[in-house]
Image: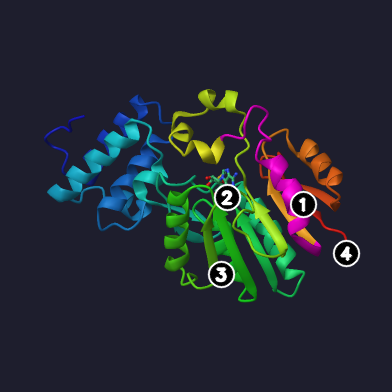
Amino acid sequence: MTAPAGLDSVRDALRWGESRLRRAGIRNAFMESAWLLAARTSAGNAGDLILRRSEKISAPARRDYRADVSRRGLRVPLAYILGSQEFMGLEFRADPRALIPRPETEVLARAAIEFVASRAGRARMIDIGTGTGVLAVVLAARFPGVLAAATDVSGRAIALARANAARFGLAGRIRFSRGELFARARGRFDLIVSNPPYVRSGDIAGLQKEVRREPRAALDGGPDGLGVIRPLVQGSVRRLRPGGGLLLEVGDGQARGVARLFRKAGLAGIRISRDDSGIDRVVAGSAPW
Ligand SMILES: C[S@@+](CC[C@H](N)C(=O)[O-])C[C@H]1O[C@@H](n2cnc3c(N)ncnc32)[C@H](O)[C@@H]1O
């Protein structure tokens, strides 16, 4: 992908980026080109940049921007190019080692915050399949009384989650380990949170190109999408303290079935919460006292 020789003002660069991204099938092409350009200039944010359309762009910034637009045109997710993603008001490092945190996972984060708040801010918790570490980090950042563990089968995700915890000064408050579900967990917990992989294996090929560039282990929930959720629910029962809570994010159409798994496993007080699109997104239940 080559850029026209006159690509030296903000206005020209935005026009060029927008047309390249539009041709690549990206809907929000203008704003995405503005975000990419802002990240490569001193503008700081896209709003400032748009107000400075006549400004010249340095040669290195132009070169980097061209490369970024080119990667985005190949449908590399924007967050991977920018290297960060906002979640619950915090800016997390994001890269291909882990799933990009999603807005719908904020429903799970808020439910977990509510649970810990109802226990005066004190809880021993574990985040299973921590990815970028968002859930463990948000809870540890919000509550000094939270003692957090976080696990993932992916060593690469754990490395990224550790970097995110360090970024917020929480490295000493979250114990990270690589392993399957509870394999590396010690003792029992007041709270288990997880956003497990829940896409049916057969549906993965039909996902957006950007999503298919995220780690397969973060998406693939097996033939019926419940391949990780089933053992997670069963394993949680032995890992919860009396009255402890299990909070799980689930896929569209899975909530009722997962609620049945909770009941079968002996969990009580089962509740389902919806995301902003009206989809049943979080299933919550607790161990008997
Ligand atoms: C959907 S991502 C969630 C990442 C992060 N918690 C979030 O909400 O953005 C699921 C994560 O679970 C991990 N994972 C998949 N199977 C697992 C298993 N059996 N045990 C532990 N972690 C697993 C994946 O590597 C991935 O990082």
Q: Secondary structure beneath disc 2? A: loop
Q: Quadrant of residue 45?
A: bottom left
Front label number (2 vs 1):
2
Please tell me which of labels 3 and 2 falls first in the chain. 2
* Residue 129 - label: 2
User: Label 1, on which residue?
Assistant: 284
Decide which of tag 3 and tag 4 comes sooner along the chain: 3
Please name whichever residue, 24 or 199, is drawn nearer the observer in this view of the structure: 199
Along the line of sight, the residue nearer the viewer: 36 or 270: 270
Q: Residue at x 62, y 44 (%)?
A: 196
- Per the model, the C-alpha gap separating discs 1 and 3 is 22 Å
Is 209 in the magenta?
Answer: no
> Which residue position holds label 3?
141
> Hey, what amino acid is under mark 3?
Ala
Span colored in magenta:
220-243
Looking at mark 2, is its residue's CB closer than 8 Å to ligand 1? yes
Q: Earlier in the sequence, mark 1 or mark 3?
A: 3
Residue at the image point whose x is 70% and y is 74% from the top: 122
Assign a secondary structure to mark 3: helix
Distance, label 3 to label 4, CA atoms, is 28 Å
